[in-house]
Image: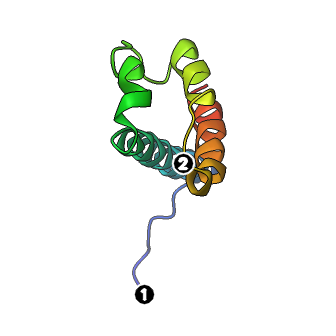
Amino acid sequence: MPAAHVPGHQARQVRLALRERVFYVRLRTMVKNRIVTAFDRYPEQTAALKRCSDLFGAASRKQLAGLQVSPSASVPWEAVIRFATIATH
């Protein structure tokens, strides 16, 4: 039977860390894209946010928290804002 290369412990740890990072970066991107998509549903309320240079900066997140949306969208919206706040730091 031919010998096979098995990466060392450190190489496996680096690969695992990289996979985790890729997962969380993709998740953060998905959430941010979801927030931007939600802006299109509330053009009057989010007009000021679209003028911000950093849509997910501290000032914009403060404005996001004060955004008035329909009751059916408010619960997931607040969860998304919390996640975006955590994911961008």
What residue sits right under mark 2 in the picture? Answer: 11
Kind of element beneath mark 2: helix
In depth, the one of 4 and 72 nearer the eye is 72
Mark 2 surroundings within 10 Å by alpha-carbon count, few (fewer than 14), some (14 through 19), many (20 or more)? few
User: Could you tell me which quadrant the N terminus lies in?
Assistant: bottom left
Where is residue 80 shown, x and y percent of the image? Answer: 58, 44
User: Could you tell me which quadrant the C terminus lies in?
Assistant: top right
In terms of image quadrants, where is residue 66?
top right
Kindly identify the amino acid type of the residue bearing the numbered disc 2: Ala
In space, the residues marked 1 and 2 are separated at their CA atoms by: 24 Å
Mark 1 surroundings within 10 Å by alpha-carbon count, few (fewer than 14), some (14 through 19), many (20 or more)? few
What residue sits right under mark 1 in the picture? Answer: 1
Describe residue 74's horizontal placement relative to residue 22 as left or right: right
Where is residue 45 shown, x and y percent of the image? Answer: 44, 29
Kind of element beneath mark 1: loop
Vertical placement of residue 82 versus 9, above or below? above
Vertical placement of residue 60 versus 21, above or below? above
Q: Residue at the location (49% across, 49% down)? A: 27
Describe residue 75's horizontal placement relative to residue 30 as left or right: right
In terms of image quadrants, where is residue 46?
top left
In depth, the one of 43 and 24 nearer the eye is 43
Describe residue 64's horizontal placement relative to residue 38 as left or right: right
In the rendered structure, which disc, 1 or 2, sits on the residue that comes first in sequence? Answer: 1
Kindly identify the amino acid type of the residue bearing the numbered disc 1: Met
